[in-house]
Image: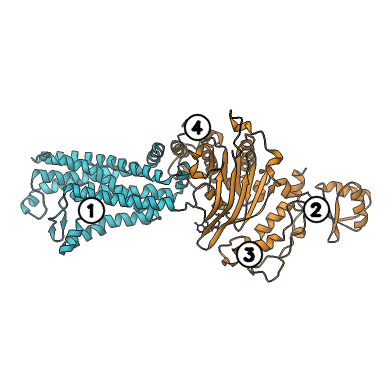
Chain colours: A orange, B cyan
Amino acid sequence: MTAASAGTPSQSALGGPTPAVDPTRGRIEVRGLTKRFGRFTAVDHLDLDVVPGRITGFLGPNGAGKTTTLRMLLGLIRPTAGTATIEGRRYHDIPNPLTVVGSALEATNFHPGRSGRNHLRVLADAAGIDRRRVDEMLELVGIPAAASKRAGGYSMGMRQRLGLAGALLGDPRVIILDEPANGLDPDGIRWLRGFLRHLASEGRTLLISSHLLSEVEQTVDDVVIIANGKRVAQGTVDELRGDPTAFVRTSDPDRLASTLAGRGLSVARRDGGLRVTTNDLAMVGDLAHAADIAIHELRSEKTHLEELYFTLTDQDQYRNRNLGDAEGTGPGGPVDRELGQLPPPTGRPVERPQPPDPDGASGETGRDGTTVGDSAPTRTARQENGS
Amino acid sequence: MSKAIKAEFRKFFTTRLWWGMLIAIVVAGAALAALFALLFTSDTVMRGDGMGVPTSDADLARTAFTSGIGVGYLLTLAIGVMTVGAEYRHKTITATFLAEPKRSVVMGAKTILLLVVGAMYGAASLLASVATGAAILSSRGHEPFADPEIWRTLALSLLVLGLWALIGLGVGILIPNQVAALLIAVGVAWIVEPIVGAVLPLSEIGGSIARYLPSQATNATLDIQTVGFGGPVTDQLPWWGGALVLTGYAVVMALIGTLRTVRSDIS
Ligand SMILES: Nc1ncnc2c1ncn2[C@@H]1O[C@H](COP(=O)(O)OP(=O)(O)O)[C@@H](O)[C@H]1O
Ligand SMILES: [Mg+2]
């Protein structure tokens, strides 16, 4: 399921004149990466691959270990075990790293008394980058007017843009952004999406973290999801999304099933209704109407990806894990047990599983309080951007 | 290394800290020089023959010219603390280490910055105090440059301020909270350490230890007579001994800071 093979664009975009391209060029490789803070395991034997020309979303609930992972990748935090390399080298070993790897971590990392332009000039000095590039970048991210103002007065959105300008200063092949959409308004997110897409189309490697699936789902090509420091899914967005399905409840399921099947749709029975592999609710309704079958309920179901992510973020045990007792967080904790039950990344989406043992280790509430499929509102958004 | 140094200098001169400190140091230099020049040339003090009161022209000049250094080194100490403290406080240390992952190079660049900045502030402070002091002394009939050794004292003042900034660098790293680091560093250097230095000479062993304290090493470097509770300290280090001791403090603090920084996680 290597995402790379699907649509890696021509490598020549940034390749320059060298015809024999280094196979590690633009690649990020993380193997068995582990970080323990005292007895607390923030990142747990993580494997991760990021390839050029694509945007990889690094998803996980707050506290999942995303920032810690990125900081290890950037040589800011020393791993307890494992390796994290960019183009086959540790960050420390990359000569003049800003010209190879551009990154923006939390958007608060500015001296409030220093102007945005001077912040970038400091970076340009440190990496030996031409000063003219500073103003070009400010222009590019759309904050030239604020450039000479003190960064302490910047809005969150402006800070994000300044961080982005800093990441791009050295014209890097690999770009790593931690929660870049945080604090952006919808317009800003749209702008960011187009911007990142453009960078990827130039053949650059993009690794983007977020704790909100909805923020990045339409931006990224590949997804890596982590929870409690462990990887729980990796694949292309399309793979993880699975096929779009509609759920329909009717007075006459047998006849509707055969009607729909007759139109080449794949139909399965469930909970006294049918699930149809399509995102076209109107067609299902029309077919039923034409066959004179009464519809009691008709809605889109969550995609597999949404459901997977919902499972991770909606339950207490996956959030604030450092607030509770540490018992459930070790290897063999609820993650393994719970996520072991999750549906496979491709194929027919299924209901969110019930915990296998009701007397689960952590004993936290709310684990089985909701049934995703039934309580979720009809997903009109899916229809709009589907197909 | 030169890129890292350039970046450090730009960092230093792109916030308001540098000129705020410059004003403080110049004002302190001028005001204290004026105060001491006027005080020690006034009739009451001259007649009083008190202990430690300078009488010769050379001593008068030295006292007036170096009077701002005591405040000056507290300020460069604070600058040293803030050079690294602000980076941790505002998390700009992340960007710094992303641009130059070899942390010892960054620390080396900061060391050079602080030595240069210390000398720069020293020059500004001396300019103010020598100008003010010389004007007052000569107007009262004293020769400000009677002793050529005053030039050695002035030159070493530049070094002293840089060395205190390096001590601050170490403190700023060892005490991660910038405000706490500032209060502790300045509080100890300004109040605690001089008191300890004044009390120690009351015993014999204490006296031989006291001259190795940073403030007394500083005085020795500048040929300033240290006065303790037991009167003027007699066995001060020679000027070069004081300079060596103070350099030792600076090297140890900067090295401890560097080792700490190289090992620590930046999160
Ligand atoms: N320096 C640290 N010391 C102790 N715990 C830490 C430290 N840094 C992060 N953590 C903990 O590690 C976990 C992962 O944090 P983080 O990587 O920031 O998660 P994310 O970025 O996915 O929200 C959190 O529970 C956090 O509290
Ligand atoms: Mg984070």
Residue B144 lies in what quarter of the image?
top left
- Say what amino acid the circle numbered 4 marks: Arg
Q: Mark 2: give few (<14), some (14-19) or many (20+) Cα within 10 Å.
A: many
Residue A74 picture location, percent across and down: 52, 46
What chain does mark 3 sit on? A
A193 sits to left or right of A172 = right
Residue B173 picture location, percent across and down: 38, 53
- Per the image, the residue denoted by label 2 is A299
Ligand 1 shown in quarter: bottom right
Q: Rounded to the nearest whole Å, what is the CA distance between mark 2 and mark 3?
A: 35 Å
Asked if residue B161 shows in the view, the reply is: yes
Q: Residue A133 carries which label?
A: 4
Same-chain status of marks 4 and 3: yes
Q: Residue A333 carries which label?
A: 3
- Say what amino acid the circle numbered 3 marks: Gly
Same-chain status of marks 2 and 3: yes
